Each structure stands twice: as C-alpha cells, then as structure tokens.
Amino acid sequence: NQARFLSDCITSLRDQTYSCWEAIIINDGSSDNTKEVASDWCKRDNRIRYIEQENQGLSRARNSGLREAKGELFQFLDADDMLEP
C-alpha cells in the first residue's frame, strides 16, 4: 500500500546516469492503486515489469523479484525509497 510513493521512486531510478537497468515491481497484496500506478509506468518504460502476488511478506516479495531478474547486480528499492542522482 505504497502507491503514493511509487512514481517518485521510479522517477529517481530513471534519473540515474546509468541507463542499463530493469525494475521489477512486486505488488505483494496491496489494496491501494499500486497496480494502476505500476501498469502506467510499464507502458511508459519497457525496462519496468510488474508482478502481482498474494501478500507473502517482504522477504518473499524480494525473492520473487530475484527469480525474475535478468541482471547480474541487484539493488532492492522499496516504493518509499529514492535514489540520489
């Protein structure tokens, strides 16, 4: 239930000078409009993917993201986090 922060988080990621990244948004049972916000970002940037699952907790959500990731380096970024430029 952090949809209100998600756009700022993704914007901070997109503002990085390194552009070869992927973002996997794991919706771990949110009851707010996370799906709509994430889906909008997926349409705008093909480096962003969205996965929805029943609430299983933070560790399982992160493990879901790791299973789907295609890169070699990983950084966990919660919806209420922002990256410095």
Image: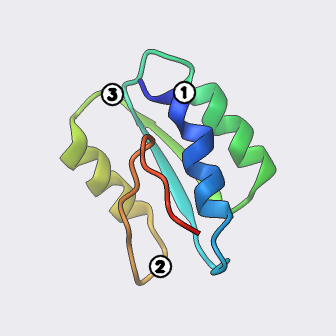
- What's the CA distance linking mark 1 and mark 3? 20 Å
| Label 1 Cα neighbours within 10 Å, binned few <14 / some 14-19 / many ≥20 | some
Point out the tag, 1 or 3, that comes first from the N-terminus.
Answer: 1
Taking 14 as reference, is 26 left or right?
left
Mark 2, secondary structure of its residue: loop
Residue bearing mark 1: 4
What residue do we see at 52% from left, 28% from top? Answer: 3
- What's the CA distance linking mark 2 and mark 1? 27 Å
Q: Relative to 19, is 36 above or below?
A: above
| Label 3 Cα neighbours within 10 Å, binned few <14 / some 14-19 / many ≥20 | few
Residue bearing mark 2: 71
Point out the tag, 2 or 1, that comes first from the N-terminus.
Answer: 1
Q: Which mark is residue 54?
A: 3
Nearest the viewer among 37 and 49 is 37
Q: Relative to 66, is 9 above or below?
A: above
What residue do we see at 38% from left, 73% from top? Answer: 74
- What's the CA distance linking mark 3 and mark 2? 25 Å
